[in-house]
Image (spheres, rainbow, N blue to C red):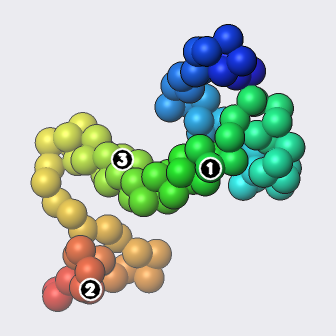
Amino acid sequence: MSDERNGQRRRFAAQEKVAVLRQHLVEKAPVSEVCDQHGLNPTAFYRWQKEFFENGAAAFEGRWNRIDDARGEQDNTISRPNGSRLCGDATCQG
């Protein structure tokens, strides 16, 4: 709930922001309902959503870096089910 009535603004942690966005994006709750439930201004909700999508790729980039670090490799190739390998944006030769 928001404390703006008391002159204080609530700060949401990153995990709380994701949970709020999830209510709308996954559970299909209307934005107005989600914002009312959390005492959130819809403008803030849409700003969070914009930031979430603009920075979403970082979640996947970090995953590959952690896997590579665990293997001790810097190999950025991906093996496909058909046996070919994917190197960055192109299929590997050989």
Dot 1 or dot 2: first in sequence order is: 1
Question: Separation of disc 2 and disc 3 at Cα?
Answer: 21 Å
Q: Secondary structure at mark 3?
A: helix
Query: Which quarter of the figure is the C terminus placed in?
Result: bottom left
Q: Residue 47, image x and y in percent?
A: 53, 51
| Residue at mark 1 | 43
Which comes sooner in the sequence, label 2 or label 3? 3
**Upstream in the sequence, badge 3 or badge 1?**
1
Q: Which residue is mark 3?
A: 63
Give the x, y percent position of residue 80. 40, 75
Labelled disc at residue 91: 2
Of circles 2 and 3, which is in front?
3
Q: Nearer the viewer, residue 53 or 75?
A: 53
Disc number lying in front (1 or 2)? 1
Res 45 visible? yes
- Disc 3 marks a residue whose amino acid type is Arg
Q: Residue at x 37, y 80 (%)?
A: 83
